[in-house]
Amino acid sequence: MNGDNDEILKACTFFRGLQPGKRRGLAAMARRISYPRGRTIFRQDDPCPGLFVVASGLVRVFKTAPSGKEHVLHFAEPGQTFAEVAVIGRFACPAHAEAVEDSVCLLLPDQPFARALDTDHELCRQLMASMALWVRKLVGLLEDLALRDATGRVARFLLEAERHGIDGLSFRLPMLKKDLASHLNLTSETLSRTFRRLIDGGLIEMIDAQNLRIRDRTGLGEVAEGLPPAEFD
């Protein structure tokens, strides 16, 4: 995503409802920062530096347990945000953020952004609507973990991931399989077995390690909604 700060914010889903004048005010306070691949942007429990908007690249947001185990919360792509909950709630970063690729982000610094929220009720109202959409996404993730088995979780994820590609063509997984396993709360071995089950069932076709094609969207949708694996084995 190229362009000036205002164009980047305009393309951001989180700020989609903002009026042009309010968006330009945020663009004026934003700092553009480049992060090379592998660079830590912030660590869990660090003071929150502000709200980040991904302009290009890919950012991994993940938590670390005391045992050292990582759990991937989500990947922020161009047009998406991260650290929005922490900056609005004014608490420490609840997770780590790391650039998976060479990335450019806009940072809306915490103090100027907080002042904008304190003085502009309309801005708060519009951002609450965006936060509601984010909460709905998190509820969907919790439903996956609580109500779907491994096959259902993977099937639902693939259907969502395909929406970003071109219908009928292969698409690239938005993350490495080890990160996908973590994101879906699966072991790498379970993820591999689940992919094999979907392939053998004629629902998907693996092109290579990261690219695949959905062969039976209806069938995969049924699996995502809870069809027992035995019915398509």
Image (cartoon, grey):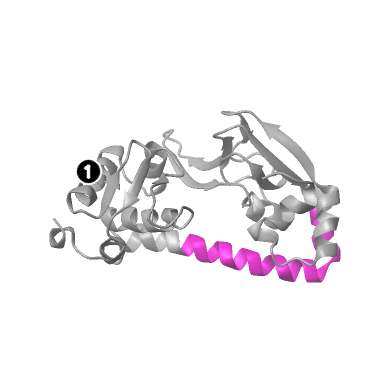
Report the predominant secondary structure element of the magenta stretch: helix
Quadrant holding the N terminus: top right
Q: Give the residue drawn at x 67%, y 68%.
A: 128
Q: Work out whether residue 23 can be spotted.
A: yes
Up-down relation of residue 169 to residue 231 (above or below): above
Q: Is residue 26 left or right of residue 125?
A: right
Q: Is residue 71 magenta?
A: no
| Residue 105 falls in image quadrant | top right
- The residue under the point 74% across, 44% down is 107
Q: Position of residue 134 (x, y in %)?
A: 57, 62
Residue 37: image location, x then y, percent: 58, 29
Tell me which residue sits at (18%, 62%) in the image.
228
At 17% from the left and 49% from the top, the residue drawn is 200
Quarter of the image for residue 19 reads bottom right
The percent coordinates of residue 66 (x first, y second) are 45, 36
- The amino acid at mark 1 is Arg
Location of the C terminus by quadrant is bottom left
Magenta part of the protein: which range? 113-139
Q: Can the viewer see residue 90?
A: no
232 up-or-down from 210: above or below? below
**Residue situated in front as seen by the camera: 112 or 167:** 167
Does residue 135 appear left or right of residue 87 in this picture?
Answer: left
Say which element carries label 1. Answer: helix
In the picture, measured across the screen, residue 161 lies left or right of residue 104, that is left
Which residue is label 1 attached to? Answer: 193
Q: Is residue 198 above or below residue 47?
A: below
Marker count (numbered)? 1
Tell me the crowding category of disc 1: few under 14, some 14 to 19, or many 20 or more residues within 10 angstroms, Cα based.
few
| Residue 3, horizontal then vertical, whole percent | 75, 46
Q: Answer left or right for 198 relative to 84.
A: left
Q: Is residue 129 magenta?
A: yes
